[in-house]
Image: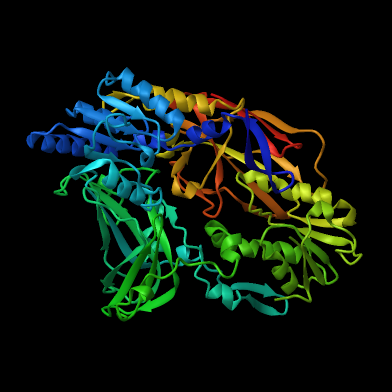
Amino acid sequence: MKTFCGRANPTTGAMEWIEEDEDYDYHQEIARSRYADMLHDKDRNTKYYQGIRAAVRRVKERGEKAIVLDIGTGTGLLSMMAASAGADFCYAVEVFKPMANAAVKIVEKNGFRDKIKVINKHSTEVTVGPDGDMQCRANILITELFDTELIGEGALPTYEHAHKYLVQEGCEAVPHRATVYVQLVESKRMWSWNKLFPIHVEAEDGEKIIVSPSEMENCPGVPSVCDIQLNQMPSSDITVLSDVVRMFSVDFSKPVRSASTYYRVQLEPIKSGEAQIVLSWWDIDMDPFGTINCTMAPYWVKSTSALQWRDHWMQCVYFLPNEEPVVQGEPVYLTACRDEYSLWYKLQKAREEENKADVCVESPVCRCQAHLLWNRPRFGELNDQNRTHQYVRALMKVLETDSVCLCISDGSLLPVLAHYLGAKQFFKANNLEDKIKIIEARPELLTSSHLEDKKISVLVGEPFFTTSLLPWHNLYFWYARTAVTSHLTSDVTVLPQSASLHMMIVEFQDLWRIRSPCGTCEGFDVQTMDDMIKNSLNFRESKEAEPHPLWEYPCKSLSDPQEVLTFDFRKTVPQHCLSTEGSVNLLRKGTSHGAVLWMEYHLAADISVSTGLVQISDEKGNCEWNPHCKQGVYFFSSVIESESLSAFPSTVTYAICFDTKTGEIAMEFKL
């Protein structure tokens, strides 16, 4: 059997269905999963174990048998904790078949075959009774069904069903409750991920300002949460307008309702300002008394020494539909609305009439289309005045008053910049209707009539394409440039004129955990899981790089950055592969976790923009990364510790090949 997977083709910029081996999907699921991250989360595991021991003890003290239902068991870890704590029997439910098979092996390996039954079903399909999956209802409910937003993975309907059909009334629950907290803030940086700011352009005839249309200005955006590592956001980028407030709690030991509802709290601003953002996170109490608590609170709420790094649970950024001015000491009301899977917020000045129909506002819908075209990092990129200035400088160098320009990029503002800088006519592939013509045609289907029989003298691109996952996927610009060759003048100017691929060896502060074997977790052997992840990572003949926004994941450079490949956009894409081999010296002590790869675009002489490294900020090698782009990360399968650098530094050798037929880059590193 074969399976079809949707994947962007970097040579066409289009989504295509690729035929893959039937196991491909599940290998990807496992290889890119966060299982290792969860198993490395010491704080989570310890607190769960403490909560489970206490729950089993309370049931036993009542003279009852401890029957556990563990929903979403994964590796079986929480069920093994319960069995070790003295539970009489555990039903471990796991819907993902490869994971359920692994759980069976792990349970057997750890000697709990007689105490734990793994059920490969969705919990809503589990049956209870003499001939059912479970002999009787459970009196201890254990789950780990939470995402960064708490409810995004369907925790509420799962709990609702479990209380109705699978557990006893008055059961123990681990965790016992979850509480969601909010804080109102002003942040120009985060707001720039949601709205297009005015763009200032210094032209020869004075300053021009590009402003977004009112429908974009007033658009509430998209409702999906923005989940980030808030602990990497410097305090200088956030103005706190309120104290932290408890928004709502869910008691998991009692019947849970998943139906849409709302919660409202009164906030008293501690500072005047523009309320733009609701920051939110949750904590879970593993026991009814709140003595065993696991929190996602960011660094300014919780002492730094107690912070546990994790990537499977982060913090939430919610954008209010519009900026709301607040005044210190003047109360405002914050309403959180939710459906089964998501939350959204609105802020009001005075308490309106308690009319439920009014309060439970509809989930916000983007009306301007921009929020559907541009993701949050893209908004940030378009709002980056320094980046815009580089493009303006480059355009001023290449534009003539009679330039006929073609822009190939998705949702780009370059045509507007070029118009203000004096281009005669601008064609935009993919409110200056008379000056800028939008051509709804793919580059290879461009005809002379599209271009009004004109030849293109300046071809521009950022380049940026919404289908790009890895940094080099934006090389689609090169393929598009090749496709439109017949429409270009013989002395055409291409901006950017070239691009280069750069690479650096790094040591991650924490990100390495997501790919690191665990071995044992809280005394249980989970080697089977390690092997399963490794097998899935090796499913492809060559390991692939994966995209990560490294501003959220601190690392230090162990080598100098190195340019490894160049791509000349002034020429068409060659037929042959572009490949390179070499070695890079390790200059600092540390653990080589992997290589980071990124692109630099050379717009014009001496003007470049980087999608990766901004600077190595100190002698320790700490790095500052472009915050609007994801970088490519290639994790080494074995790491080298260079604690003592001898007179001859260690080296990492590499072989990198850009396949011009597929637009993909294959790479190999040897330590």
At 31% from the left edge and 30% from the top edge, which residue is drawn? 77
Q: Quadrant of residue 106?
A: top left
At 72% from the left edge and 32% from the top edge, which residue is drawn? 579
Is residue 643 something one can see in this rendering? no
Quadrant location of the N terminus in the rendered image: top right
On the image, the x and y values in percent for residue 526 come to 35, 24
On the image, the x and y values in percent for residue 289 come to 13, 49
Q: 567 or 286: nearer the eye? A: 286
Q: Is residue 426 left or right of residue 592?
A: right
On screen, residue 225 above or below 85: below
Q: 613 or 441: nearer the eye? A: 441
Q: 400 or 51: nearer the eye? A: 51
Is residue 233 something one can see in this rendering? yes
Q: So how many labels did they put on this image?
A: 0
Q: Quadrant of residue 83?
A: top left
On screen, residue 324 above or below 279: below
On the image, the x and y values in percent for residue 243 come to 26, 66
Q: Is residue 598 left or right of residue 104?
A: right
Q: Is residue 224 left or right of residue 472?
A: left
The colour scheme applied to this rendered structure is: rainbow
